[in-house]
Amino acid sequence: MNRISHWVDNGVRPGVSGRSAPVHDPATGEVSAHVDLASTAEVDAAVSSAAEAATEWRETSIAARTRLLFRFRELVEANRDELARRLSAEHGKVLSDAGGEVARALENIEYACGLAELLKGGYSEQASGGVDVYSLRQPLGVVAGITPFNFPAMVPLWMIPNAVACGNTFVLKPSEKDPSAPMFVAELFAEAGFPPGVLNVVNGDAEAVNHLLTHPGIAAVSFVGSTPIARHVYTTGTAAGKRVQALGGAKNHMVVLPDADVDLAADAAVGAAYGSAGERCMAVSVVVAVGDVGDALVDAVAARVDKLVIGPGSDPDSQMGPLITREHRDRVAGYVDAGEQAGARVVVDGRQKRFDGDGFFLGVTLLDHVTADMSVYTDEIFGPVLCVVRAETYAEAVGLVEANPWGNGAAIFTRDGGAARRFQHEVSAGMVGVNVPIPVPVGYYSFGGWKDSLFGDTHMYGPEGIHFWTRGKVVTSRWPDPATSSVDLGFPRNH
């Protein structure tokens, strides 16, 4: 049986805690590996390694860091199929979807390769008589990332390239459900030539997470996961004096106006709701059908759902794979039960779909006439369930988005430019799509939501990522002639 351990000082560090967890192939239900779960002492060892590397890494020139990042980018590009295969085997998403994840990860590495431009400060000559003022961005030291199961390659690579480009060393705690892809990333990182300790990986569970959050050697923590855990990460980490960004859950709405292209909207809804079995924080889980578009839209979505091919991620014909665990699959099916009992109309019933073997498969579900008091609407299901809510007016539709506690993403489908501009101006969400169902920003913008989708004031990657992984310093400089020096007890003034 394959054993997955930790990665410290550019090599595998076998676990010594005596604790481990099974890693499953979601397509078969079989255990494919066991992953070691780190003790607090093992977390301490990883942080100590990063701390030892931090002093030298901070002093490494921007030119040298840039060369290493370019080498790393080339290695990820050369191994993109292998990386996709590894994450598909443990997550369950189909290979085409896994390949898209790697492609988005590459965008963030490429952005970090521009660190020479990103780390420029400002300079003001002669701010006062003989005085110059300039600003710097400097690294924090040892930083950490805690990443989710649903994007085991992309989310770590939202964090690591920018953090190390800024001069920090990094400790990663990936999901214990699918750890092979992050471990492969660490191998490629070492192969690129990064010094030992710049990137360490500790696999683990809540014990490792909580120790990272309170460890005095960690300066900042970046997290992606569910809202309850994000709130815990933020409150615990900030109470320990750390800088924290914690991205939480979502209930993303897609508003479809009566003038929308129904076929375009239906295609978008199916792809955004059921891609990756709905296990995306940017998945569309609610379609708000405005006015008389509802019946035609529901019929169009249902017609497309009937043609979806669900199967193992390794099968090139599969469009959707299994869910991550048996328990999660059953939980998602339970939400469909609750929605039906509450009065929603089950247009397509994923519970009735039958699959061979013991994989964690569930068919896709389409629920119509969902109301805002049903659990299928109020809770983040994180599975292949699409809810359709009917609204009479644009104002009513936007009111639903505004009343929702989450604000990760929101989309509108319309041919009306005025309505689209009004929506992007009014809606309370961090990422907005206009005829785009999943508005995940490109690598040179930043990813993050509003309301309970984000704890902290800084979004992920892009310009805000550079800000998060550095702290500002302003230098006021004067080189006076000693003959003109004198004692002045007054408050400094500009002359």
Image (cartoon, grey):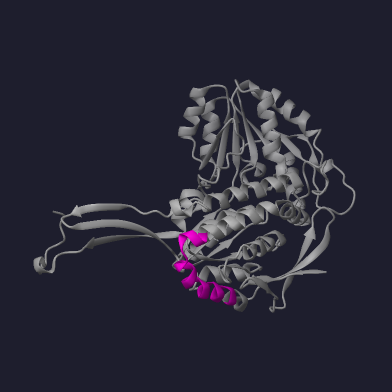
Residue 311's spot in the image, x, y percent?
83, 45
Residue 132's spot in the image, x, y percent?
24, 57
Please say if 9 is above or below 136. Answer: below
Q: Residue at x 51, y 41 (%)?
A: 429
Disc tally is: 0
Please say if 27 is above or below 344. Answer: below
Q: Decide if residue 315 is on the left or right side of residue 251.
A: right
* Residue 229 visible in the current orientation: yes
Q: Residue at x 51, y 45 (%)?
A: 444
Residue 70's spot in the image, x, y percent?
57, 55
Q: Quadrant of the N terminus?
A: bottom right
In the picture as drawn, the residue positioned furthest to the right comes out as: 356
User: What residue range appears in magenta?
Assistant: 45-65
Residue 338's spot in the image, x, y percent?
72, 44
Q: Residue at x 70, y 44 (%)?
A: 278
Q: Decide if residue 234 is on the left or right side of residue 271.
A: left
Q: Is residue 54 magenta?
A: yes
Q: Nearer the viewer, residue 380 or 241?
A: 241
* Residue 456 visible in the current orientation: no
Instruction: Give the overall secondary structure of the magenta segment.
Output: helix
Which picture quadrant has residue 400? top right
Q: Residue at x 76, y 44 (%)?
A: 337
